[in-house]
Image: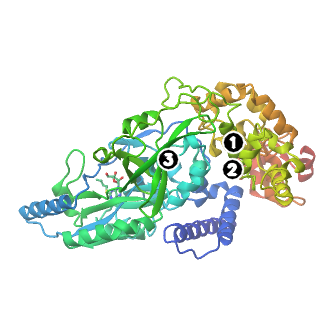
Amino acid sequence: MEGSEVLRAEAERLRRDIERHNQLYYVKAKPELSDYDFDLLLERLVQLEREHPELLTPDSPTQRVGGTVTKEFPSVEHREPMLSLANTYSIGEVEEFVGRLNRLLEAEGAEGRDLVAELKFDGVAVSLLYRDGLLVRGATRGDGRRGDDITVNLKTVPSIPLRLWEFDGPFSAGEVCEVEVRGEVLMRKKDFEALNDTRPEEDRFANPRNATAGTLKLQDSAEVARRSLWFVAYNISGLHHEETSHGDRLKLLETAGFSTGGHYRLCHGVEDVEAFIQLWDEGRRELPYETDGVVVKLNDVRQWKLLGATSKSPRWAIAYKYPASRATTVLRDIVFQVGRLGTITPVAELEPVRIAGSTVSRSTLHNFDEMERLGVLPGDRVVIEKSGEVIPKVISVLLEERPPGLSAKELPSRCPECGTPLVQPEGEVSWYCPNEDGCQAQIRGRVLHFASRNAMDIENLGESLVEQLVAKGMVKDPGDLYFLGEEELTALERMGEKSARNLLQALLKSREQSFACLLFGLGIRHVGRATARELVKVCTSMEALQEATFEELSEVPDIGPVIARSIRDWFMKPSAPLLIEKLRRAGLPLVAEEPKPLVNTNFEGLTVVFTGGLLRHDRSSAGELVVARGGSIVSTVSKKTGMVVAGKEAGSKLEKAQKLGLRIITEEEFESLL
Ligand code: IVH
């Protein structure tokens, strides 16, 4: 074998190994390699592809990290419409459905009455197209006929195979083979919570489904990759010899490298279906992702065509939805909270009640409109609902149980904290306290946000301490934290010398946080952690950010006019320059550490080929030297090559470069150019 063939074979083997370990980890949850060893494999492949770009293939696992920025997703037509399912909350209707199926099949003289019961995943439906085994397109459901082509984003999902496994088996019987896999993209409950933790309060996702939908629409695929989405497959079509049962198709999906969730059951009659529904009513709470019901499908897929579909849903399937968990309790009082952005939120204080495995004693009523829509009075008995894992909601009042003599909670016209008259900006439902700089509740909220884990990560700065610091006027904005002295801290209640010193230590340590963390910590409306990260790539210092115009900001990926306006407004506030000055004097990072600035521009726009043996550099560090000076590295010589660095015993590449009349230099000349 020639040298290049050896490398090609190595790359091929690495790709296969990495994808297999990926699947063992993400789909089977049975990893065989440590993270460290896995990273070593991946690094080797990255290195091979960097040095030999011709070895890069579209199904390479190195492509999963994302990095492409898409302005708009093209609309594409589905091979077959993506229908939805007929829904029911009643077991009786599931029985009727099974009865109807049996009658229809009997009339057709068809055999095979078995059903498959599987979980109904609560995520976002997508379609994946594989041509000759290779993932070529991934699209959203859209209106059912046309959806958005979000291939770049879906490629980052580790449980979506980039190439079907065992492609040589059942998939490749014909010439061109186009297979379609449909399923649901999900966000696991714990990833959902971690994601929300990084977001500003006003931009939190209500549930994992919304978070998934929001993530799939992102223009920056690297951010999609970071959010670790999950895919479960529930159908495959386009096979040359179609499997005749749905159960077999699910098994085939598993052989092809997909996860089906693994929890489906062949049912011989409606009793089996009911047992499955009952089994998962409680069991689903233990699953890592959300499910909202059970889908019942006819097992014999040959009958699917026969039975057909209505305009919306197929006749061979039905979805049973679990009722959301509900409980009733007494609403003791309504209190009004002031958020760090001044938003007034009515909060229901409840008689503690157990619901779906946890005790609930508070629940947000969102805003005044919602409070009035519910018509709830302190003392009322109310219905609380918890759907999925989401924060419980008050959904209605039991009017027939209302005790006599209750009176309405008066809506505040002034801030409950500082007494300033509230305002309602045009077009918004919320009311605000406009006293940004004087309202202690807002200051407390801003300081706590600044100190939070994903921002400056200041340990030892809890709520009660912040309350004292703000109440005593020692802290008026987050910048003041850095000018607190040990003595004044020790004088505070419940504050010993040791805790004071710990806090000062934590403040010192927080100066190591990145500029992006600091920016997130400022609490600019709509600027979450991901947005902050995007921003600092373009505006690499506080000055640059201060000077960026609305238009420039709107150009940044994932930042639209609303966020751009919000950033501009923040910097226009009279208090902003003072805060920034304090942060500067405190020695905080007001510049981004990445991307690295160019050393010089000696290689700007030049593509460079290294050939032969270099004496003083290895290939990859020589490459980095070029990149740091504005150039780029390619591995093959062509007319477009700007320069060839020829080392010892350079061979065919040197010959070709000579033929093409390219600029050829020695290693010494290369060094002097640096
Ligand atoms: S089968 C013809 N199976 O529910 C529709 N769908 O309301 C074929 N869903 O859009 C879909 N889990 O997004 C099927 N095990 C499952 C499912 C499932 C969730 C979603 C899917 C679909 C919606 C239908």
* Residue 444 disc label: 1
Task: Tell me which numbered mark, 2 or 3, is placed earlier along the sequence.
Answer: 3
Task: Tell me which numbered mark, 2 or 1, is placed earlier along the sequence.
Answer: 1
Is residue 340 left or right of 269 when viewed as pictured? right
CA gap, disc 2 and disc 1: 8 Å
Which of the two residues, 336 or 582, is positioned nearer the viewer here? 336
Residue 248 lies, in percent from the top left, at 31, 70
Give the image quarter of residue 109.
bottom left
Label 2: state its secondary structure: helix
Q: Residue at x 81, y 46 (%)?
A: 628
Which of the two residues, 216 or 462, is positioned nearer the viewer here? 462
Q: Does the residue labelled 3 lie within 8 Å of ligand 1?
A: no
Q: Residue under circle 3?
A: 216
Q: Residue at x 71, y 25 (%)?
A: 572
| Circle 3 or circle 1, nearest the eye | 1
Q: In this view, does 175 lie above or below 553?
A: below
Amino acid type for the residue under numbered disc 1? Arg
Q: Is residue 631 above or below residue 54?
A: above
Of all residues, the one furthest to the bottom in this rendering is: 32
Cβ atoms under marks 2 and 1 closer than 8 Å: yes
Amino acid type for the residue under numbered disc 3? Leu
Q: Quadrant of the C terminus?
A: top right
Q: Can residue 245 be seen? A: no
Label 1: state its secondary structure: helix
Which of the two residues, 26 or 417, is positioned nearer the viewer here? 417
Q: In this view, does 437 lie above or below 624?
A: above
* Residue 12 disc label: none
Q: Residue under circle 2?
A: 463
Q: Can residue 149 be seen? A: yes
CA gap, disc 3 and disc 1: 35 Å
Q: Report the image quarter containing ligand 1.
A: bottom left
